[in-house]
Image (cartoon, rainbow, N blue to C red):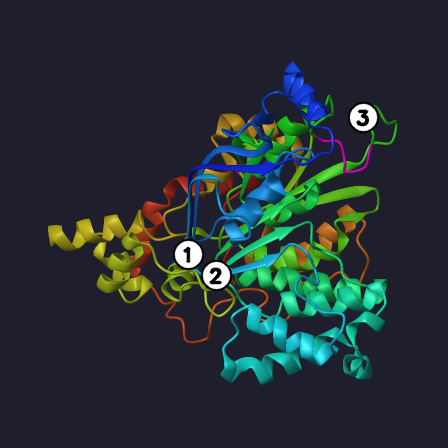
Amino acid sequence: MAKIVLSRVHVDFPLLAEDGRSLKRLISQAGIRSRFALDGRQRAILKALKGISVSFHDGDRVALVGPNGAGKSTLLRVIAGVYPPTQGECMVDGTVGALLTVGLGMRDDVTGYDNIRFCLMLLNVPNEALEVTSREVAEFSELGDYLSLHVGAYSSGMRTRLGFAIATAIEPDILVMDEMFGAGDAGFTKKAQERTLDLIERTRILVFASHDRVLVERLCNKAIWLEQGEIKEAGTPIAINNRYLKSFGLSGATAPGQAAGSSVEIERVHFLHIGKTGGNSIRYALSPYLHCAGRQIVLHPHETKLRDVPLGDRVIFCLRDPVERFVSGFNSRRRMGRPKNNVPWNEAEAEAFSAFGTPNELAVALSSSDDQRRNQAIKSMNGIGHVKSHYHDWLGSRTYLDSRKIDILWIGWTDRLTADFEGLKQKLGLPRECRLPTDSVQAHKRLETDPTALDPVGEQNIRQWYQADFELLEYLLGQPAPASC
């Protein structure tokens, strides 16, 4: 399992100047004294990071937000092993890929082909994989015969293409990224974005520094606000973004690039990704249309709740029959999310799947006369990802929902998602070509080999377990949940 642990990490940079007195005067100014100091040898230093203690684990998608000079890029470089801590310790368990500076390590005096091999060796690509990986990089770069020329003859766009293709050729456990979402000309940018998003999807831990609120809320499930080289606050991306913008006197709902007080108001529509309800299909379909028809669509990760969405912003989400959701969640975690994802079991899940091989075995055991078997089933229901969650985890109590019902723009039902999505397209003014994915892996659909049947005892047990979910569905839909297809 991938892991990052930083303990009281400090990073100091020496400051060099022709006039040492100017630096000392700078250090003496109260407003910036905390970032500048003198070391033990009376040399001026910049305290880039000050006492950072934080840990990241499998599944974490962490955004670093804060003003320029806050220490975001420095923290990324510490994790990537570029900067050693001046004090403290940074422990990284897993391979690290860094999208920090495109073209880092490339040489102007050799060909594109030679640069590909050299840089892949720097990235620790094994010798037996060099030839295949080099071909993949060359093909993705679309530079063709130019790869036979020395890189010094390349335009800046060609260098960016090659550097980006090399940097994204590996599949690391941990990906650190610094505002890296474009490469080369407009025709190449979309391809580069898709490759980057695919790399993010497969990596176990993402640490992403960005000023783009939409990307932060779309890609990340945690956020850290850095200020003056220190952690100011940590929380969910939308909550941290709101407080960060508020510190500048901006509204939490202000769209990126929109000045505070502007007369142009952009409606924000938030998609809450409730687990195992078809959310991957919705995210895939909406991703190309995040700014469309005067609206900004924000695609949230599983961790974002209705309470994290600002009052007055519109909300969309999907729901599903709780029995079907249980079966889907059990099978998805039994496969560790494969083939789309690969999220290893935690300790509770490993114990659960060693005891129960099918959803029906777990469901039936909930009413077993064997106390040990029944208790194991209850423990498993509370330990398996997706299975242990309930709708109120995302939506809150009925009282809270009453206060937010006016904000709910659309609710999709998983078993009729194609038809319901057409209604959403009309509400959002999306074009006809906006469609749900047909590829089962992209949609994260169940496998044909997944066991899905529940016998009557098992189904009754699951209905009782999720009774509160059924009641919430009836409350939201104004009628009993639609019959399953």
> From which residue to which does the magenta span run?
253-258
Q: Farthest residue toward the top?
A: 30
Give me the C-alpha separation between circle 1 and circle 3: 41 Å
**193 is higher (above) or lower (below) than 263:** below
Residue 350: where, in percent of width, then height? Answer: 28, 59
Dots 1, 3 in contact, CB < 8 A: no
Numbered disc 3: secondary structure: loop
Q: Mark 2 falls on what kind of element? A: loop
Q: Give x and y (percent) for residue 27.
A: 64, 21
Residue beneath disc 1: 2
Q: Is residue 21 left or right of residue 306?
A: right
Of residues 303 and 465, the one nearer the viewer is 303
Q: Which residue lies under the disc numbered 3?
A: 260
Q: What percent of the width, then of the height, locates residue 398?
A: 49, 30
Residue toward you, 408 or 456: 408
Label 3 neighbour load within 10 Å: few <14, some 14-19, many 20+: some
Q: Point out which mark residue 173 bears.
A: 2
- Residue 142 seen by the camera: yes
Q: Residue at x 60, y 79 (%)?
A: 133
- Which numbered mark, 3 or 2, is in the foreground of this view? 2
Q: Is residue 445 above or below residue 225?
A: below
Which residue is at a point 28% across and 57% down the rendered structure image?
A: 363
| Most foreground residue, 477 or 304 | 304
